Amino acid sequence: MDKLEQNKELVLEYFDAISGKVKTVENIDRYVDDHELKEHIMFFDTIFPKYELHADEVTAEKNRVVVLARLKGRHEGELNGIPPTYREVDFKFAIGYIVDRNKIVDHWMIADQAALMEQLEIKAEV
């Protein structure tokens, strides 16, 4: 298997390892060496406990892997001042990873925040 395929497999294995489960530091550390990403994962697990990740499309080039994905979960924790609504959400996001020595070492993410707010039935202040 070439390096591009190995990097894609690492990211898909990582998605599978944390999807639908309580995110533990030990489990995340197996795949991630990016402090900000670790904090992000733990933060979102308090808002959407045991959230699921679904990879819709995965591409790789050099040491980068980009995933078009969805997060599915139930809003049970405060999100930017928004109290829990207990609504189910399913929103799209794109995330890019830099992989080095079989670990994710950096990332960026763009999420469909408007879709998330709509699913939570939060109206924007004008």
Image (tube, helix red, strand yellow):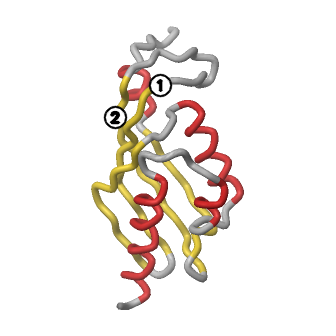
Which residue bears the numbered disc 2? Answer: 90
Query: Residue placed farthest to the left in the image?
Result: 56
Residue drawn at (42%, 45%), measured in percent from left and top? 20
Neighbour class for label 2 at 10 Å: few (<14), some, many (≥20)?
A: some
Furthest-right residue in view? 35
- First in sequence: mark 1 vs mark 2: 1
Q: Is residue 27 above or below residue 62?
A: above
Element type at mark 1: loop
Could you tell me which quadrant the N terminus lies in? bottom left
In the depicted structure, whether residue 4 falls above or below residue 14 = below
Q: Nearer the viewer, residue 81 or 12?
A: 12
Q: Amino acid at mark 2?
A: Asp
Circle number at residue 97 = none
- Residue at the spot x=37%, y=29% of the render? 89
Q: CA distance from mark 1 to mark 2?
A: 11 Å
Q: Position of residue 26 (x, y in %)?
A: 65, 60
State the image coordinates of residue 123 (x, y, percent, origin top left): 44, 11
Residue, disc 1? 75
